[in-house]
């Protein structure tokens, strides 16, 4: 009968020799432990397409306003604030979802958070669009009339895109969330 070894190691961590080979506390060791996965199926979904529209046309919206003397009317400060802030936040949210960051932050109720974000963004963009459209008239005799008029148009399109995103995120929030139990039960 085989003898039981007298010395048994029950360590679950790595030894110091292994840690120094992997990089230890250096940035290289940290970077090697981070796995980046891109969700390609997300890019082909309707919410992702809407987010890309919001980012592209939102960038065009605030670029048109920024290329004209928008400081003449104080209302354009609000329009620029809403356009630039939501453009930055939408870009961050897009890349967070694309690279699956929400899977690591499980304490955040993502469907509810995204629905709330899109709903608030739609309301804020609606106010910015209305302020932009109402303030185009004073520039009617200047060369910047086209900038502000086009910005009002693109503001309306981005408002509709955020509204559609809010609708689809509402459907996602109210949906079953991909529960396996509800998908396997015969009806």
Image (cartoon, grey):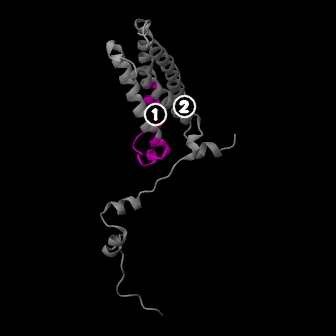
Q: Does the magenta stretch include residue 120?
A: yes
Magenta stretch encompasses residue 107: yes
Label 1 residue SS: helix
Q: Name the residue under label 2.
A: 50
- The quadrant of the picture occupied by the C terminus is top right
State which quadrant residue 32 falls in. Answer: bottom left
In primary-sequence order, the first of circles 1 and 2 is: 2
- Mark in front: 1 vs 2: 2
Q: Residue 114 carries which label?
A: 1
Badge 2: how crowded within 10 Å, few (<14), some, or many (20+)? some
Question: What segment carries the magenta color?
Answer: 95-121
Looking at the image, which is closer to me, 184 or 131?
131
Above/below status of 80 relative to 15: above
- Can residue 178 be seen by looking at this rendering? no
Nearest the camera: 168 or 179?
168
Which label is found at residue 8? none
Q: Is residue 153 left or right of residue 28?
A: right
Left or right: where 77 falls relative to 43:
left
The image shows residue 46, relative to residue 26, as above or below, that is above
């Amino acid at each position: 009968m085989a003898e039981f070894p007298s010395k048994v190691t029950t360590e679950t961590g790595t030894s110091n020799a292994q840690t120094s080979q992997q990089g230890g506390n250096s940035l290289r060791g940290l970077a090697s432990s981070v796995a980046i996965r891109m969700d390609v199926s997300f890019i082909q979904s309707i919410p992702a397409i809407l987010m890309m529209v919001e980012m592209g046309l939102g960038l065009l919206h605030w670029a048109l306003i920024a290329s004209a003397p928008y400081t003449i009317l104080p209302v354009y400060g609000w329009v620029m604030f809403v356009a630039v802030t939501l453009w930055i936040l939408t870009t961050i949210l897009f890349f967070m979802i694309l690279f699956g960051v929400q899977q690591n932050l499980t304490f955040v109720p993502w469907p509810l958070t995204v629905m709330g974000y899109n709903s608030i963004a739609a309301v804020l963009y609606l106010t910015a669009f209305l302020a932009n459209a109402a303030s185009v008239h004073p520039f009617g005799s200047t060369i910047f009339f086209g900038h502000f008029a086009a910005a009002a148009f693109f503001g309306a399109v981005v408002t509709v895109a955020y509204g559609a995103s809010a609708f689809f995120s509402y459907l996602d929030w109210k949906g079953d969330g991909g529960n396996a139990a509800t998908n396997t039960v015969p009806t």
